[in-house]
Image (cartoon, rainbow, N blue to C red):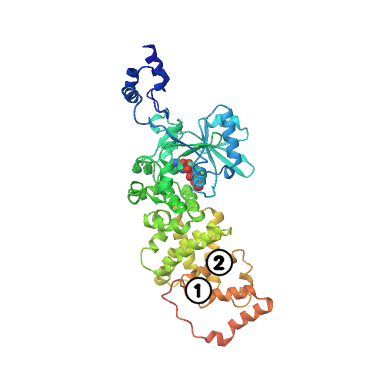
């Protein structure tokens, strides 16, 4: 009898969300008859422990999976090591592990631990606890920040309202219920984002079949998709972003509810959506992201005006947004700067022009007045969805205003325009409009030449514009006015 008691005590605490499977070790049993009882006893233990989370992780050797340890952040390893030395469990998890397995360059490294934020702060004196909805610790090493999160658990396990809170729509407003590694894996978004690497033992712990999904190149949300999107609708945008970046397909169940739940994004704070838009557009896969955002009908919850402009079959509009995304990806690939002012300015250009045209058709207003009024309307509509900080909003409006000024080059206007701090962005914008099919009577080319010339040639170029012959030159027919006509 004592032996059976010993066996039961050896098994992990019952009715917990412990990751280890409660099993009877056959080495403790001596006789054949006793061994024959093992399956029955294991079934009994499984029953007692609750089957919900009794599944242990698949543990594999990270090197054998192709992880190159030289590409791991030294600082992330340092964080794991220090936490483990202090007696805590700690792993590298998330995009860092996923990207190394795919031989991609990780953007950053996140660490997950069973230490609470306060305990982490005790290990790293300079660490900062940040966030409210989701408290995390930033451990800074020069320019690199390692994000340390405490294992999370499901909300049923919250002991008070300071840890967990949901909105009327079921969105998680507070997500600070701590748990163990297994519950933490279940609370993550996609299986390929829930792989735990212990850099010291060199092992990967996989609770969600992430390794298999990685191999099959599918993005699969963990748990019941609708419930997980309701908890955090931003996961729909993350699905699009990862599918685009990794070139993965969305697993059927992960994909199915997105269109019908897209409107949940309207309840997300505009500042968070702005951050997500930047991640979608500046991650080097803007073209694929844009396509998926349109396919899954998510775009109209981020850029309502733009999505409306894309509803018709105006080929200029379609080509223009495609070129904006393509151009952004090219610039990111060649390490060129991309400003959100340009991207937002370009996406909102289509509804802006539509609104200006309407105003000008209804009443006799100048282009610049029409632009001012249309801009107030379009920017207002946009700010109800995504934030757009002033440092981007102001230059965006300047780029727009310059579109009306670039055609006016007489006198010393051209010389002044080229000195404008936003000239370069406005010129790039103008070229995009032309590339998308707008006929601006060679304006882009004129400005290209102008920039290449010395002072005297520039004066000659302007003089030529003013020559009577140039004035009488028959105007090239515009295609159905795509843009507001500059004031004469
Ligand atoms: P990236 O390459 O963009 O950094 P990432 O997967 O590391 O990709 P992060 O935003 O850095 O993404 O988040 C780190 C990890 O935290 C994710 O891999 C995922 O496991 C988890 N996570 C982040 N956001 C969510 C969310 N909204 N819901 C559930 N889990 C999330
Ligand atoms: Mg990350």
The quadrant the N terminus occupies is: top left
In the displayed structure, would residue 144 be above or below residue 392?
above
Question: Which residue of the protein is positioned furthest toward the front in this rendering?
Answer: 32
Which of the two residues, 419 or 182, is positioned nearer the viewer here?
A: 182
Q: Residue at x 39, y 39 (%)?
A: 167
In the displayed structure, would residue 167 be above or below residue 29?
below
Secondary structure of residue under mark 2: helix
Q: Where is residue 365? Give x, y as percent.
A: 46, 71
Mark positioned earlier in the residue sequence (1 or 2): 2
In front: label 1 or label 2:
2
Which of the two residues, 316 or 162, is positioned nearer the viewer here?
A: 316
Disc 1: residue Cβ within 8 A of ligand 1's nearest atom: no
In the displayed structure, would residue 405 be above or below residue 200?
below
Question: Dot 1, how many residues are within 10 Å of its Cα: few (below 14), some (14-19), or many (20+)?
Answer: some
Residue 380 appears in the picture as rendered: yes
In the displayed structure, would residue 74 be above or below residue 1?
below
Question: Dot 2, how many residues are within 10 Å of its Cα: few (below 14), some (14-19), or many (20+)?
Answer: many
Residue 189 appears in the picture as rendered: no
Q: Which residue is mark 2?
A: 426
Q: Which mark is residue 378?
A: none
On screen, residue 24 versus residue 282, left or right, reads: left
Q: Which mark is residue 486?
A: 1
Q: Where is residue 43? Give x, y as percent.
A: 32, 25
Q: Where is residue 454? Give x, y as percent.
A: 68, 76
Question: Which residue of the protein is positioned furthest toward the top in this rendering?
Answer: 1
């Amino acid at each position: 009898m004592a032996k059976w008691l010993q066996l039961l005590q050896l098994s992990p605490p019952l009715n917990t969300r412990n990751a280890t499977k409660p099993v009877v070790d056959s080495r403790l049993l001596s006789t054949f008859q006793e061994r024959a009882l093992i399956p029955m006893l294991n079934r009994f233990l499984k029953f007692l422990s609750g089957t919900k989370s009794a599944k242990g992780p698949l543990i594999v050797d990270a090197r054998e999976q192709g992880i190159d340890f030289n590409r791991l952040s030294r600082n992330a390893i340092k964080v794991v090591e220090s936490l483990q030395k202090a007696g805590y469990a700690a792993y590298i998890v998330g995009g860092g592990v996923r990207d190394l397995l795919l031989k991609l360059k990780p953007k950053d490294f996140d660490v997950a631990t069973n230490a609470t934020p306060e305990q982490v702060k005790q290990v790293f004196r300079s660490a900062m606890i940040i966030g409210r909805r989701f408290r995390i610790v930033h451990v800074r090493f020069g320019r690199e920040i390692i994000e340390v999160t405490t294992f999370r658990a499901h909300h049923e396990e919250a002991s008070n309202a300071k840890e967990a809170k949901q909105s009327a729509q079921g969105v998680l407003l507070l997500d600070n219920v701590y748990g163990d590694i297994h519950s933490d894996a279940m609370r993550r978004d996609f299986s390929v984002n829930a792989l735990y690497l212990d850099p010291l033992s060199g092992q990967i712990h996989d609770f969600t079949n992430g390794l298999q999904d990685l191999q099959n190149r599918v993005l699969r949300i963990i748990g019941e998709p609708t419930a997980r999107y309701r908890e955090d609708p931003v996961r729909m945008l993350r699905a699009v972003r990862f599918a685009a970046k990794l070139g993965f397909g969305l697993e059927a169940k992960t994909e199915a509810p997105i269109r019908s739940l897209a409107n949940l994004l309207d309840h997300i704070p505009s500042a968070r959506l702005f951050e997500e838009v930047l991640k979608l557009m500046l991650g080097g896969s803007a073209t694929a992201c844009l396509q998926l955002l349109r396919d899954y009908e998510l775009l109209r919850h981020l850029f309502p005006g733009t999505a409306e402009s894309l509803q018709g079959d105006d080929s200029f509009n379609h080509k223009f947004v495609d070129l904006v995304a393509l151009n952004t990806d090219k610039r990111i690939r060649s390490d060129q700067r991309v400003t959100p002012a340009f991207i937002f300015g370009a996406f909102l250009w289509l509804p802006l022009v539509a609104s200006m045209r309407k105003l000008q058709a209804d009443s006799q207003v100048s282009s610049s007045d029409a632009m001012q009024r249309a801009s107030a309307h379009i920017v207002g509509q946009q700010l109800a969805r995504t934030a757009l900080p002033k440092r981007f909003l102001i230059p965006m409006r300047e780029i727009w205003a310059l579109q009306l000024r670039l055609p006016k080059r007489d006198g010393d206007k051209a010389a002044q325009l080229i000195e404008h701090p936003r000239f370069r962005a406005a010129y790039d914008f103008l070229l995009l409009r032309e590339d998308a099919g707008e006929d601006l009577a060679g304006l882009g080319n004129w400005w290209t030449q102008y920039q290449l010339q010395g002072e005297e040639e520039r004066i000659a170029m302007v003089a030529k514009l003013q020559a009577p012959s140039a004035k009488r030159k028959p105007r090239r027919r515009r295609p159905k006015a795509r843009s507001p006509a500059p004031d004469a």
